[in-house]
Image: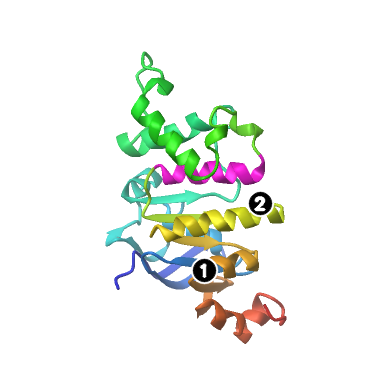
């Protein structure tokens, strides 16, 4: 099966620091692929190379055969790649409904443009799609609330709705449960499982091993910019290199 995202020999330096060193990854369509590793391993740097925030010094990143190198973030988004950030990036002063309508416009039109004489909430087709997405993530009854009033778990659900309304083929998640209480974490795991069951490919960066082993079909382990191990969750659990580098020798 052809990879949906292929990463070949990617290197990235920041001055004298080599953040990524000959990284190779193949993300298979319809799977959840977790990337784990200690702080400073290069995980977020790698994700930034996927979405156009950084350009690798060497190597290639291709999505469905399209090179992502030197494409702008919005161009990568138009291809079908959406990202959920570690800290939810939402429009705090807007309602949940408005938050979801904006990325729908952006994906449909290539940029957010709106006639000042035609209020956004009056565009019934877009409103209906946004309401559908909010209901899908369990926020339908809160559509008129201001986004800043939400709990952290609900802000994450809102951000997921903002991504899903763009109908992504590949969803990138950077620490999706960071800062959450266990109940919110478990609810987020359930939601992500539901999303994955629809065939949306996901790449997940996560420190919480409960989240990783609940979701991942395959795991890649980064340490000091290298991929030191890769495989199915059970293989990674028993890998002594992972236990030593990532967990100080303790079993996962």
Picture residue at 58% right of the left edge, 27% below the top: 93
Picture residue at 55% right of the left edge, 27% below the top: 144
Identify the residue position indicated by label 1 in the image. Answer: 216
SS of the residue at dot 1? loop
Q: Position of residue 96 (x, y in %)?
A: 53, 32
Q: Position of residue 29 (x, y in %)?
A: 36, 65
Q: Earlier in the sequence, mark 2 or mark 1?
A: 2
Quarter of the image where one finds residue 210: bottom right
Residue located farthest toward the top when viewing the structure as drawn: 117
Quarter of the image where one finds residue 101: top left
Q: Is residue 164 left or right of residue 173?
A: left
Q: Is residue 236 above or below residue 186?
A: below
Q: Work out whether residue 82 or residue 16 is closer to the camera in this orientation and state it.
A: 82
Q: CA distance from mark 2 to mark 1?
A: 19 Å
Q: Is residue 85 above or below residue 9?
A: above
* Mark 1 surroundings within 10 Å by alpha-carbon count, few (fewer than 14), some (14 through 19), many (20 or more): some
Where residue 184 is drawn, which disc sits there? Answer: 2
Q: Which quadrant would the N terminus be assigned to in this image?
A: bottom left
Q: Which quadrant would the C terminus be assigned to in this image?
A: bottom right
Q: Is residue 245 left or right of residue 191?
A: right
**For the residues carrying marks 2 and 1, which lies nearer the camera in this image?**
2
* Mark 2 surroundings within 10 Å by alpha-carbon count, few (fewer than 14), some (14 through 19), many (20 or more): some
Is residue 177 among the parts visible in the rendering?
no
Q: Work out whether residue 34 or residue 222 is closer to the camera in this orientation and state it.
A: 34
Q: Is residue 159 magenta?
A: yes
Q: Work out whether residue 198 or residue 42 is closer to the camera in this orientation and state it.
A: 198
Q: Is residue 150 left or right of residue 96?
A: right
Q: Is residue 169 magenta?
A: no
Q: Main secondary structure of the magenta part?
A: helix
**Residue extent of the magenta highlight:** 151-165
Residue located farthest toward the left when viewing the structure as drawn: 65
């Amino acid at each position: 099966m052809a990879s949906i995202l292929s990463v070949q020999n990617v290197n990235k330096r920041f001055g004298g620091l080599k953040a990524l060193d000959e990284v190779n990854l193949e993300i298979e369509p319809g799977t959840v692929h977790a990337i784990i590793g200690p702080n400073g391993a290069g995980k977020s740097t790698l994700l930034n190379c996927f979405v156009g925030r950084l350009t690798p010094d060497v190597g290639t990143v291709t999505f469905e055969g399209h090179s992502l190198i030197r494409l702008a973030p919005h161009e990568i988004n138009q291809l079908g790649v959406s990202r959920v950030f570690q800290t939810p990036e939402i429009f705090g002063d807007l309602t949940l409904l408005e938050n979801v309508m904006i990325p729908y416009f952006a994906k449909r039109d290539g940029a957010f443009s709106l006639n000042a004489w035609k209020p956004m909430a009056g565009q019934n087709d877009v409103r209906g799609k946004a309401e559908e997405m909010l209901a899908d993530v369990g926020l339908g009854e809160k559509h008129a609330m201001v986004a800043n009033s939400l709990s952290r778990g609900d802000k994450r659900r809102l951000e997921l709705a903002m991504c899903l309304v763009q109908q992504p083929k590949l969803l990138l998640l950077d620490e999706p449960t960071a800062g959450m209480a266990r109940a919110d974490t478990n609810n987020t795991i359930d939601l992500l499982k539901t999303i994955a069951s629809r065939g949306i490919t996901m790449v997940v960066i996560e420190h919480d091993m409960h989240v990783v082993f609940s979701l991942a079909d395959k795991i890649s382990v980064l340490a000091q910019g290298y991929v030191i191990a890769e495989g199915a969750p059970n293989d990674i659990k028993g890998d002594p290199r992972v236990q030593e580098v990532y967990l100080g020798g303790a079993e996962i």
